[in-house]
Image (spheres, grey):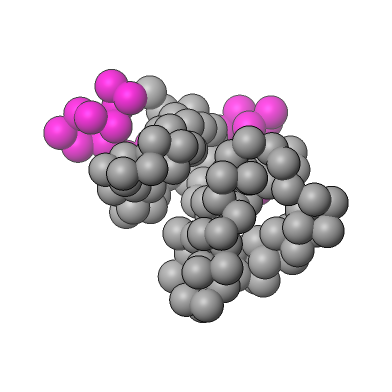
Amino acid sequence: MSTFNRATLVKVLEILDSANAGEALAAAKLASTMIREAGLTWDDVLAPQIENRNEPMPAARTIGAGPFGYRRERELSPHEQFFMVLLSPRTPSEIKRKLRTWEARVLDGEITPQETQDLRFMYQSFVVG
């Protein structure tokens, strides 16, 4: 079970109100992934209070938690990296403006190998770093 951060989930869920349907769908998928990888269900999240879960984690789930509660056992997709960079308070506004021009292509999986590499660098710099 990885760390659950309700404040981050709230930021992601606020994107559901976007006029851009692709952006709203991506936010919904990211929120569901955050919940699943934290070892929670939507019922747990919507409960009035999340119980303190300090019980020891099983050995298979002790992989270090990454940014936004993601487990580090897998490489994040460009789509996930894209939204994490956009949501990070450490990402400069000029970078966020540049990324907005990539949004449709990222959602369609049509970014170039160079853009994928640039996105990975931005993710490492502004989210993980």
Q: Is 53 within the magenta? A: yes
Residue located at (80% from left, 50% from top): 112
Residue located at (84% from left, 51% from top): 113
Q: Which residues make up the magenta segment?
A: 42-66
Q: How many marks?
A: 0
Q: Please provide percent x and percent y for residue 27.
A: 43, 40
Q: Is residue 115 above or below residue 28?
A: below
Q: Is residue 43 above or below residue 26?
A: above
Is 72 left or right of 127, judged from the image as shown?
A: right
Is 79 left or right of 48, judged from the image as shown?
A: right
Residue located at (52% from left, 59% from top): 100
Q: Quadrant of residue 47?
A: top left
Task: Specify the quadrant that holds the C terminus.
Answer: bottom right
Q: Is residue 62 visible?
A: no
Q: Nearer the viewer, residue 93 or 85?
A: 93
Q: Is residue 83 visible?
A: yes
Is 91 left or right of 76, judged from the image as shown?
A: left
